[in-house]
Amino acid sequence: MAITASYDTLLKQAPMTADEYLRAAVRSIDEQFEKGYAQKHPELIAAFMQACANDLATSTLVIAIQEAASEIAQALQSE
């Protein structure tokens, strides 16, 4: 599966992803501690958002490697 989005589209989608991470961070932190805790501790929000971004980047890279390896294996088998 190839990424068909243009760089411009990906650039425009990035803030939506960050917004989703931000909302998830506040919700999760406040559920773990108490309502309003996230607002008092922006460093936790930043760490949560960074963890989300790292997880997504790692997962998508692994999928891309798996897909490439599969295509290479199929090409070698057909020779």
Image (cartoon, rainbow, N blue to C red):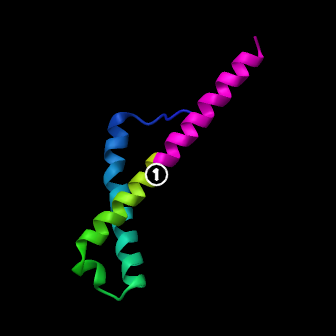
The quarter of the image holding the N terminus is top right
Q: Is label 1 in a helix, a strand or a loop? A: helix
Q: Which residues are magenta?
A: 58-79
Q: Is residue 76 magenta?
A: yes
Q: Position of residue 42 (x, y in %)?
A: 24, 72
**Label 1 sits on what residue type?**
Leu
Q: Residue at x 39, y 34 (%)?
A: 6
Label 1 neighbourhood size at 10 Å, few (<14), some (14-19), many (20+)? Answer: few
In the rendered view, tell whether residue 14 sits above or below residue 65: below
Q: Position of residue 79 (x, y in %)?
A: 75, 10
Q: Position of residue 31 (x, y in %)?
A: 42, 83
- Identify the residue position indicated by label 1 in the image: 56
Q: Quadrant of residue 62?
A: top right
Q: Residue at x 72, y 17 (%)?
A: 76
Q: Residue furthest top?
A: 79
Q: Residue at x 41, y 52 (%)?
A: 54
Q: Residue furthest bottom?
A: 34
Residue closer to the observer: 33 or 11 = 33
In the rendered view, tell whether residue 29 sits above or below residue 4: below
